Amino acid sequence: MIQNNWNDLYSGWGWILWFGIVFLLFSSIGNWGYSYRVHRRYAASPGKTAIDILNERYASGEIKQEVYVQMKSDLSKG
């Protein structure tokens, strides 16, 4: 006769084993998701582009229109 040992996995310490496996699985997935979101948020370059800085300088009146047009054309060439 074939003995069925399947119930041994669900009696006594077997429940704690399965609970631990499920807990580790969910916590690993959660940790991966959290670190993925954090790396995507901070991996993007937060700095301004040269055009942004040039536009701010022109808007604040730091440079004149002729200089602005010349610098903008120089930036668009390169």
Image: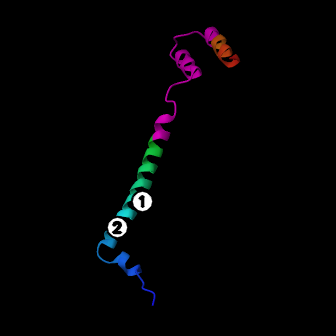
Q: Secondary structure at mark 2?
A: helix
Q: Nearer the viewer, mark 2 or mark 1?
A: 2
The x and y percentages for residue 62 are 51, 11
Residue 44 in magenta stretch: yes
In front: 31, or 20?
A: 20
Residue picked out by circle 2: 17
In front: 71, or 30?
A: 30
Circle 2 Cα neighbour tier, 10 Å, few/some/many (<14 / 14–19 / ≥20): few
Instruction: Please tell me in which quadrant of the rendered image residue 49 appears.
Output: top right
Three-letter code, disc 1: Leu
Main structural element of the magenta stretch: helix, strand or loop? helix
Q: Residue at x 57, y 17 (%)?
A: 54
Q: Residue at x 37, y 75 (%)?
A: 9
Residue picked out by circle 1: 25
Q: Secondary structure at mark 1?
A: helix
- Region in magenta: 39-68
- Tell me which numbered mark, 2 or 1, is placed earlier along the sequence: 2
- The CA span between labels 2 and 1 is 12 Å
> Above or below — where is 27 with respect to 8?
above
Three-letter code, disc 2: Leu
